[in-house]
Amino acid sequence: MRAILNGYTRLSRMARHGFLNGTETQLRNIYRRHNKMEDYNMVAFCTEQTTAEQEYFYSIQPMGVNACVVNLTIGRNERNLLAEKQIEAARKAGMLVHASHIARFTTPEEARDEAKFFLANTRAFTLPKNAVHTLIFTPTVADKSTMELINFFQETLYLHGYRNQDLCVTAQLITNNIIQPGNLHLRPNLTVIDYNRLYPSVAGAGTWIFDDEYLDEQQLIAYDFMDFYTKPNQMRGRQLSLDTEYIVRAGDSYWMIARQLGMELAELLLLNNARIGDKIVPGQRIKIA
């Protein structure tokens, strides 16, 4: 079991990366632990390598894992054969269930076909439309067409009525400027895969996959900073006061608040006479109107 579980101090290699927004010091401030990390809800990302045993899902739920993203499809014609059992086990453990697709597309036609294949399987498992639909994009090779293909896939889902979407990518794709979150047309949640760190190496992550092993099982586990997966009907877990102000929580940044509320970042900064790198702290009131 990894040391981060249940409040233990994580031992981590602090690999040196380039950063999307600011220096390592700025990122440390953004993700500074005003609350302990274990205070955040966690999400299990299940693939065909994840066990489907009911006892396993019962065992991780008390540790704060209260939502599960089950991979349904890979590419244009592959299915996770354990998906049905994993969905059933997660529901029995009281978890919210969401769905993911692992991308293999390299052309717009393939992106469209994969989106339709994913949708067909989502409907077969009778997942509700308010379930999050996650695109996992971890290619071995990516080029300047990447953003166009991702937007094409997610817009296909959107046109079929699926509004709650997430993009799951490695931190390296962002730091190498292959993935540009500001150019995602639908402004989905952003899940960053970034193992063996004390905090994500890019700013603006709504969800952070911090480990690929849990309870000695192959399992992707994430902190859900914005409660995107874990509290879908509670404004992503954030609280608004009655006087059109936003109350800051640990892990927030102006960029994250603007995206969550559907505001332009420039407008939010202007309202608060702030700059994008300014530090905000839990309990602080941010003007939103």
Image (spheres, rainbow, N blue to C red):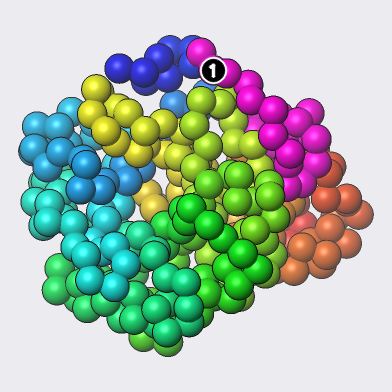
Q: What stretch of residues is rendered in magenta? A: 11-35
Q: Residue at x 32, y 28 (%)?
A: 213
Left or right: where 94 falls relative to 169: left
Q: Relative to the observer, which residue lies in front, 275 or 240?
A: 275
Q: Relative to the observer, which residue lies in front, 44 or 129?
A: 44
Left or right: where 54 falls relative to 142: left
Q: Residue at x 40, y 14 (%)?
A: 3
- Tag 1, which secondary structure? loop
Residue 274: % across, % down: 88, 51
Extreme residue in the front direction: 141
| Residue 4 in the image: above or below residue 60 | above
Q: Which residue is mark 1?
A: 12
Report crowding for label 1: few under 14, some 14 to 19, many 20 or more residues within 10 A (C-alpha): few
Residue 211: % across, % down: 41, 31
Left or right: where 20 falls relative to 74: right
Q: Relative to the observer, which residue lies in front, 251 or 283?
A: 251
Left or right: where 83 falls relative to 243: left
Residue 260, magenta (yes or no): no
Residue 179: % across, % down: 62, 59
